[in-house]
Image: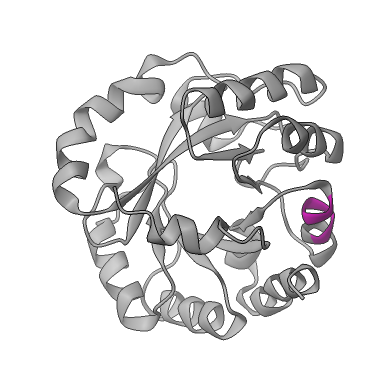
Amino acid sequence: MHTHIYNALFSDNRKIFSLLIDPEKQQGDVLKRTAELATGAGVDVILVGSSLTSVPIDLVLIDLKRFTNIPILLFPGNLLQLSSKADGILLLSLLSGRNPEFLIGNHVLASQFIKKSGLEIIPTGYILVDGHNMTSVEYISNTRPIPSDKPDIIVATALAGEQLGLKLIYLEAGSGANQRIGKENIEKVRESITIPLIVGGGVRTPGDIRNLYKAGANGVVVGSAVEEDLEILPKLAKVRNEFNR
């Protein structure tokens, strides 16, 4: 299994900034401008995917490759978002839910394609935490998020993911969440696991990012805020530099 992207991102314990691109919402000139800003801001990695999309993801990835040299990882919401045009894939197992399709079912269906694709595989424990509104992930996956006031369950779920051999934990409040993952939850997960931890959902300001890093997140994922205001991207990505001196 290739590990060069994973090692480059997480081997030296630095903070990383990830940009999530929804192929449905960022195409053409908007995608080009997003990629230019991401490159100039030093974004560490671009994630591409969404809960639902009707756009051929290959075309989006081909365009991204033309516009930037930033590593691109698939963040697939369904089997239609698989592609060999990316550099790697966050192979997500939805640990917070009990829908077998998102724990192992879709992985079985995708396994041969992924093996032949040459993608770098990053096995990822995906944990959805209640962000106080119904998110697309919750609706599409037909699973319930872990209540935000149950840190013991969140910690145990993350720890189980590490014990299963997963290489990354992704704590997610959901796209456009009304409430971000709380500081206490991030701190307790960080104290309990040894693998990298990234956090996303409802991240909109430099202060949000700064607080997530301080709480122990190795990486932060930003999506909706940049969709709404592309020009804020450099300001958001710059926060990481405060922690990587």
For the residue pair 167 and 209, the one nearer the viewer reads as 167
Residue under the image location 66 percent in, 55 percent down: 220
Left or right: 135, with 25 as reference point: right
User: Quick check: 97 above or below 134?
Assistant: above
> At which x and y percent is residue 140?
45, 29
> At which x and y percent is residue 38?
54, 77
Q: Please, which colouring scheme is shown?
A: one colour
For the residue pair 27 and 172, the one nearer the viewer reads as 172
Residue under the image location 77 percent in, 26 percent down: 148
Q: Quadrant of residue 131?
A: top right
User: Is residue 212 part of the magenta span, yes or no?
Assistant: yes
> At which x and y percent is residue 120?
32, 53
Left or right: 199, with 104 as reference point: right
User: Is residue 78 part of the magenta span, yes or no?
Assistant: no
Q: Hey, which residue is sitting farthest front in the picture?
A: 12
Q: How many labels were placed on the picture?
A: 0
For the residue pair 195 and 169, the one nearer the viewer reads as 195
Residue under the image location 46 percent in, 78 percent down: 35
Left or right: 159, with 46 as reference point: right
User: Quick check: 26 above or below 119?
Assistant: below
Magenta span covers which residues? Answer: 210-214
Q: Quadrant of residue 134?
A: top right
- Label the magenta part by its dominant secondary structure: helix
Tell me the quadrant of the picture where the C terminus can be found: bottom right
For the residue pair 211 and 139, the one nearer the viewer reads as 211
Residue under the image location 18 percent in, 43 percent down: 115
Q: Quadrant of residue 156?
A: top right
Left or right: 178, with 174 as reference point: right
> At which x and y percent is residue 133?
70, 32
